[in-house]
Image (tube, rainbow, N blue to C red):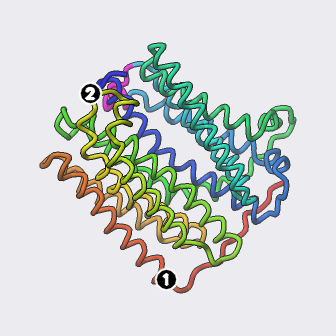
Amino acid sequence: MGPANFGIFTAFFYFLIGISWANSSLQLASAKYVAVNNINTTSEAVKVLSLDFWLAGFIMFCIIFALHPFFKIVYSLNSPVETAAGGAAAALWLIIAGYRGIYQGHMDFLKLSINQSLEIMIRAAAGFVFIIAGWQVTGALAASIAGSASAIFILTGTRGWSFLGKRELKINWGLLGTYLKTCLVLVPFGLIYALDQALVNYLREDQRGFISVCAQFGKNIVTLSLFFSNVVYSYSLKSRKGHFWAGIFLTLLAFSSAALFTVFFGKQIVVLLLGTVYLPAVKILPVYILACLPLGIMLNILNYSIARNINFISAAVWIILAILAGIYYLTLKCFDMSIFIPVMGGSVLLADLVLLSLVFLKKDLEMIPPIKNNY
């Protein structure tokens, strides 16, 4: 994939990831439902919740496909096939998040991590084949579809479609209500996560591809920190004590290790995966990874606040999104990426401090209400 197509794919892909942080909302809602309602077997949980997961995925696909005119203008995504592929990928990301929430609710983190690893390997292998075949942007998105569909099948087998044979279909409004409530916190986080890539066109043209390369590494580690924050969430649901600082420590360890690794081996990795044309990105790669660390910390804070039912945190995150959008825009318009990357990391770190103050200065934490079982 050449630099032009790579830029198109990266911008569109990170928009999808940004709005797909709502997926984590469904995963948390699913985990909460399983834990609160004491559904002890995976097969029973899959039977009860599959309709809700697939309905949410279908809605996600329709929303993204309806936005094709917007993508055509903003991301130069001319083919509706590419938009449909992106919509299908995002829908499957949402569905598999729901199923993974079942395992999270059962605190079966071994199966959860194995499934996530298999998805990554299948996606990478499919991406290599599709891009070599010349599918370009569509191929990259098709690889994501292949990885997610395989991961869903590995988790559920044919049980995930069992609701299709029912005469009477019931929607679990309690689960979907919890999902929407959690979206109010994690959707603005997703937009913060994707904000630099959404505004990357304001950088000098010769720097856009390089910062997109850095995002491939730095943002993936933010995704890894999602696993740590989900562990914190699960323990907070079960014991009310939580493991907040353990999650922060693991996040710090993951980012610092990745940054150190790229100092010594960044050149070899970039050349192997992307070619010599992207070598200038090597110098800024460790700095970009460290600048993404505050995003990982923010994710831990938000998941902890959701588990503790701290309702006002959603308003705070939307305000932070608006402020960061202004800071990013002005910095990108006035400076190059050597200034923008530290500003990005520093501004999100300040936002983390504000959120920490709000969370830990609140003494009267509310009890977590159960989700009504409609079955």
Q: Nearer the viewer, residue 312 or 249?
A: 249
Q: Is residue 349 above or below residue 6?
A: below
| Amino acid type shown at disc 2 | Val
Quarter of the view holding residue 50? top right
Q: Residues within 10 Å of mark 1 (few under 14, many from 20)?
A: few
- Residue 375 is labelled as none
Quarter of the view holding residue 175? bottom right
Whether residue 371 is in magenta: the answer is: no
Q: Secondary structure at mark 2?
A: helix
Residue 59 visible to the viewer: no
Q: Earlier in the sequence, mark 2 or mark 1?
A: 2
| Amino acid type shown at disc 1 | Lys
| Left-right relation of 87 to 198 | right
- According to the image, label 2 marks what residue? 277
- According to the image, label 1 marks what residue? 362
Q: Position of residue 309 (x, y in %)?
A: 58, 71
Q: Residue at x 57, y 60 (%)?
A: 181
Q: Position of residue 71 (x, y in %)?
A: 38, 30
The range drawn in magenta is 70-78
Name the quadrant of the C terminus: bottom right
Q: Position of residue 220 (x, y in %)?
A: 45, 46
Q: Position of residue 340 (x, y in %)?
A: 21, 51
